[in-house]
Structures are given as structure tokens and as C-alpha cells.
Image: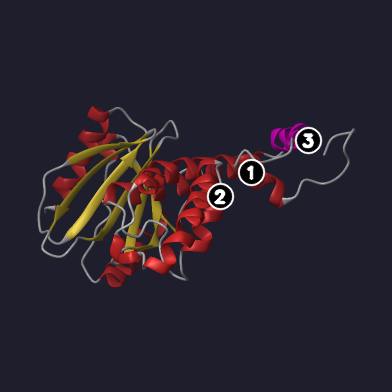
Amino acid sequence: MTPHDPSPITEDELHAYADGLLPDGRRGAVEAHLAAHAEDAARVRSWSAATAALHAAFDTVLDEPIPARLTPPRARSRLVPRLAAAAALLAAGGAGWLLRGAVGPGESPSVGAPLAHQAAVAHAVYVPEVRHPVEVGAAEEGHLVAWLSKRLGAPLRAPHLGVQGWDLVGGRLLPGERGPVAFFMYADASGRRLTLYVARAAAGETGTAFRFSQEGAVGVFTWVDRNMGYALSGELPRPELLRVADAVYAQIER
């Protein structure tokens, strides 16, 4: 609130500010609120980062032609304007609202996207979180690894990266394209964060070399080993991220 505008700041206004859709008359009040409320400011930053990651993951999909087999003749004339409206909404910054309507219960918004895109979106959503970046903290590492291993149906481990300067923050369970996903988070002494995303690999994909991709500000190294896909994500120079990826791979291979 400000002395000139005593009305409280609503949750909808915070979302509108993050999406760039807030009316100019309320912008000053919201910015003053965020300056005085660090937790709300962190939430808004996380929403903005998630929207940016979603744009990076899905903007190119809007330009892809729709397969003829998916558009029966009678439906085509109605489908084109609807896709144009969806594209306009996404370009305006409403990616979260667009995906909310397009994704069914229990599904991941990144279904069908490459592993790097899925990992980058998860990284952008959870890394800015201040109070709840993970579901299970590092103090319960044994429980965390056992729980995620059971859900994925494969033995997992949370790599120890202290030699590389990274400590485990904890982890969480996420929905993925092929079932549950294990998500581990690490932090260094300066507060930077890395995330390791572990999911079932595609059928027949049993091993690949490291692949690097850049999703906005987030660099991602991906690889497949023993029918599992791995993605290490972070806002780090590529050589530094590769050094950590090498360490993760070495421990998983044991």
C-alpha cells in the first residue's frame, strides 16, 4: 500500500505485474509493496522466470504447422482463429494461464518437450523460491533418495558435489512425460543454485554423450545412462557447468 492508494495489493495484481499486464495506475503501488515485502518480491521473480522459461520451451511450437491428420476439414476453419488467439496470449506474457487451460490434471506442462526444456522449466520455477525450494531437505537425504527411487522404480543417488563447491539443498518429486521425475537442488557459498533432473528415458534410448543447450539464461547438460535421462541445469558458464556434470556422471556410474 502507499499513502496515495490505500487499497491492498491482491494476488491477482502480483500475477498481472509478473506477466506485464498490470494497469499503469497500479504499478507504483505494487512496486512499493514488493520493495517492502521480500517474500512477495521473490515470488514475483520466480513467476517471471518461469514464464521466460516457458517461452523458451514452447514459443517455437506455435510456428509449427498442424498435421493435417489432426485437423478434420470441418474443424480447420474454426481452429485457425483459435490458434491465433492462443499465440497472441502467449506473446503477451500469459503463458501460465494458457498452459493452465491446456494441461490436464496430473500432467506436466512440458509433456512432449525435450528433456532439456523440461529441466530448464523446472529449474526456473523452483530455483528462485526462498522458503520452499524443495519438498525434502538435505538433512533427510536418505529418506529423499529412498522415496524418489521407489517412485521412479530405479535406484537413484543424490551426488555429493562438495569438492566442486556445491552442497545439496534437497529435492522433490515432479510429474514428467514418462511418469515421476526426481529433482535435486544444490547451492554454493554465494547462493547460486544448480538442479539435477532425473527421468525415465525414451524407449530404446539407453546411452548418449553429453549434450549442451542454452534455455534463456539457463545452461543445460543432458545425457542418458542405463535407461534414465539426466539434465543438469544452472546459470553458469558452460565450462563450469560441464565440470559439475562430469562429477555427477562419475558418481552415477559407480
Q: Give me the disc on residue 29.
A: 3
Q: Which residue is drawn at 56% across and 49% down?
A: 131
Given residues 83 and 216, the one toward you in this image is 83
Dot 2 corresponds to which residue? 131
Going from N to C along the chain, the mark reached first, 1 or 3, is 3
Quarter occupied by residue 163? top left
Separation of marks 1 and 3 at Cα, in angstroms: 16 Å
Q: At which x and y percent is residue 139? A: 41, 56
Separation of marks 2 and 3 at Cα, in angstroms: 25 Å
- The residues colored magenta run 24-36
Q: Residues within 10 Å of mark 3 (few under 14, many from 20)?
A: many
Q: At which x and y percent is residue 210? A: 15, 42
Going from N to C along the chain, the mark reached first, 2 or 1, is 1
Tag 2 secondary structure: loop
Q: At which x and y percent is residue 66? A: 34, 56
Q: How is the image coloured?
A: secondary structure
Dot 1 corresponds to which residue? 39
> Do the numbered discs 2 and 1 sit on residues whose CB atoms are within 8 Å?
yes
Q: At which x and y percent is residue 232? A: 28, 44
